[in-house]
Amino acid sequence: MLIKKWGIALLGILMSMPVLAQEGIDTKINEAIKPFADAVSGFIFSSFPLAGIQFPFVLVWLIAGATIFTFYFRFINLRALKHGFHLVRGDYSDPTAAGEVTHFQALATALSGTVGLGNIAGVAVAVSLGGPGATFWMILAGFLGMSSKFVECTLGVKYRNEYTDGSVSGGPMYYLSKGLAERSDKLKTLGKVLAVLFAVFCIGGSFGGGNMFQANQSFKQVLAVTGGDASWLADKGWLFGIVVATLVGLVIIGGIQGIARVTSKIVPIMAVVYVSAGLVIIFSNFSEIPAAFASILNGAFSPEGMAGGVVGVLFQGFKRAAFSNEAGVGSAAIAHSAVRTNRPVTEGMVALYEPFIDTVVVCTITALVIIITGTWDPSVDPSQGVALTSAAFESTISWFPWVLTVAVVLFAFSTMISWSYYGLKAWTYLFGESMITDIVYKALFLFFVIVGSSMQLGSVIDFSDAMIFAMAFPNMLGIYFLMPVVKRELNEYWSDYKAGRLQKFGKAANRS
């Protein structure tokens, strides 16, 4: 009955929104927000010169943190891969533990928020701007990002709130406020300030990069394969938005369990389809593979490769799709916090696979397809990344643009439902856990799906990208103070694991 009432309320809001698609309203919104958006973006993406290259400070902040975590935890990104796989498989999953979803479902939900248009559009732009050598730096960034993901997701579970109805709320808002307060009274105020800042930035990012950008780009791809300006849908972005918003609404009404059920099915399917198509193209050009890898290695250390790899991939590429793997941003820790476990470090080990799958595997395959087919274009318009990737696949598989369209829509859809959960948890952290705050946020989120589909919101998207990157500042600063907490958790768990004191469940118990 409750879900039915929510559905009727949300549907009523959706059906009243087409008026927002009036011609010219997007221009007015852009003009109104542009000065503020430019100021915020300019601050967040401020850069400094190094060896003749302008490096955004936020990029250095993230990479430096990921490198520190990798060494501090003694290459946990390699050490825990095998055990992390066993955890994902459910070998050590206690069904009576607190939480709402399994390790696999938590990983799928977080992956659905990261595997998306960054893997399709962002990589194409990055390789075009930086050359094949950009791929090397992309892989390195993914490798280091695995350590950042381990730390933040471990903290997410350790400091989450567990409620009497079985639901949980976790993420940077909670480990920044509760974790720093636990460390010392002097850090208590800092923790509260950082938590509020993160929550505000997360809400902004959920409406923009995690929502409007996804809806906008997926509509553009649908439009492209249905005839472009001559398509029946050419002036009906609002209609596309209503359809997508309705589907998103039906999923997010069910909370994290409903989101997890959908993402655990969508993510594996869309990843397999996309990766399989990429491998078909790569191996159909088998003779070009050695040359492709040679160009990646040679270009990685050239001036062009350095600029394109570091700035092009991590800044230009990942910026355009809400920072592809989000390592260090803290958003994924919100999804991972819902896992059923009594040992926080287990979800940190599961989370290692997120940057690995997203960046090291999926992004690398996209890059190889573009390099091998020779479709990368140094003069590419960053907003045309999807079209560039589509052309690369189409050069070998003529009908692939239709498959890519399905992939883009699914990627965008899964990203939206995951980011709706991230934004909701940030929203309820600020305004309290209640049915009213829950419905208000979800209605606003669905409203922005339609706005993103029907309008050209350049300044709004720039602002929302800045919000997502801004999340990294309070998140990473707080994590530095909490690293010893994670190390203690890791050492205790690793000792139990090595000594064989961990209990196995289900099929794993039968195998042993």
Image (cartoon, grey):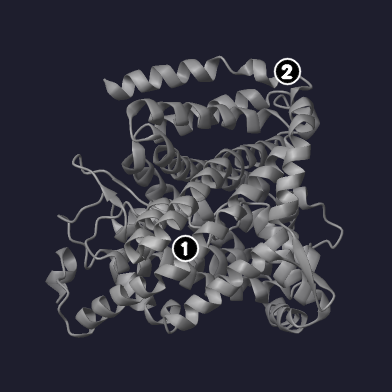
**Disc 2: which residue:** 22
Mark 1 or 2: in front is 1
Closer to us: 248 or 367? 248
Query: At x 46% / y 31%, what residue is drawn?
Result: 441
Q: Neighbour class for label 1 at 10 Å: few (<14), some, many (≥20)?
A: many
Q: Which residue is mark 1?
A: 478
Up the image or down, 328 lies above or below 490; here it is: above
- Give x and y (percent) for residue 254: 34, 34
> Is residue 356 something one can see in this rendering?
yes
Q: Position of residue 392 (x, y in %)?
A: 73, 58
User: Residue 40, how many percent across, how many down?
Assistant: 70, 47
Tag 1 near tag 2, CB within 8 Å: no
- Amino acid found under the numbered disc labelled 2: Gln
Identify which residue is drawn at 45% across, 45% down. 422
Tell me if residue 428 comes above or below residue 153 in the rendering. Answer: above
Q: From the viewer's perspective, is 105 left or right of 134? A: left
Q: Residue at x 75, y 52 (%)?
A: 42
Give 79 or 86, whichever is nearer the viewer.
79
In the depicted view, which residue is nearer to us: 342 or 229?
342
Q: CA distance from mark 1 to mark 2?
A: 44 Å
Considering the image in quadrants, where does the C terminus appear? Answer: bottom left
